[in-house]
Image (cartoon, rainbow, N blue to C red):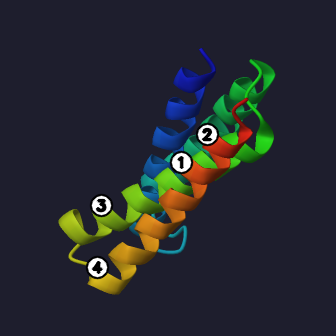
């Protein structure tokens, strides 16, 4: 169940961050509401993953790494932002680091 909460937290955070782009500095109401609701939802779901027993370092690492990767891909695919091979490599390194954190914590 903790992984479902974490997945929901990641989805909500990615939604909120993408909405932030469309809020144009919080000058557009609906995207601004999506930002606030998305981040509140993300933190609530992250807290539930922690309550269900997920380690803080692992949960936050996965949440941040997957969120960064997804936002970068969304920016490149849907928003016309650049994503160079160096940036892609950096994202891969972040994900590898989080995987090492997860695997290192297993007994």
N-term-proximal mark, 4 vs 2: 2
Residue in view at x 56 percent, y 25 percent:
3
Alpha carbon separation for disc pair 4 and 1: 20 Å
Secondary structure, mark 4, is loop
Question: Does label 3 or label 4 sit earlier along the sequence?
Answer: 3
Q: Which residue is mark 1?
A: 13
Mark toward the start of the polypeptide (4 vs 1): 1
Q: CA distance from mark 4 to mark 2?
A: 25 Å
Residue at mark 3 to residue at mark 4: CA–CA distance:
10 Å
Q: Residues within 10 Å of mark 3 (few under 14, many from 20)?
A: some
- Give whichever of 78, 23 is nearer the camera: 78
Q: CA distance from mark 3 to mark 2?
A: 18 Å
Q: Label for residue 106? A: none
Task: Tell me: 36 left or right of 23.
Answer: right
Q: Nearer the viewer, mark 4 or mark 1?
A: 4
Task: Tell us which disc is closer to us: 4 or 2.
Answer: 4
Question: Mark 1 or mark 2, which has the lower sequence index?
Answer: 1
Rendered location of residue 83, percent (x, y): 28, 79
Secondary element at image label 3: helix
Labels 1 and 2 touching (C-beta < 8 A): yes
Residue at 25%, 71% (x, y): give it: 76
């Amino acid at each position: 169940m903790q992984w479902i909460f974490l997945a929901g937290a990641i989805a909500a955070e990615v939604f909120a961050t993408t909405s932030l782009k469309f809020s144009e500095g919080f000058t557009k109401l609906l995207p601004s509401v999506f930002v606030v609701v998305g981040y509140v939802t993300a933190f609530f779901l992250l807290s539930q993953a922690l309550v269900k027993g997920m380690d803080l370092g692992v949960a936050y690492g996965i949440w941040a790494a997957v969120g960064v990767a997804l936002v970068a891909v969304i920016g490149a695919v849907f928003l016309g932002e650049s994503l160079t091979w160096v940036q892609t490599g950096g994202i891969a390194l972040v994900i590898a680091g989080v995987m090492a954190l997860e695997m290192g914590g297993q007994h």
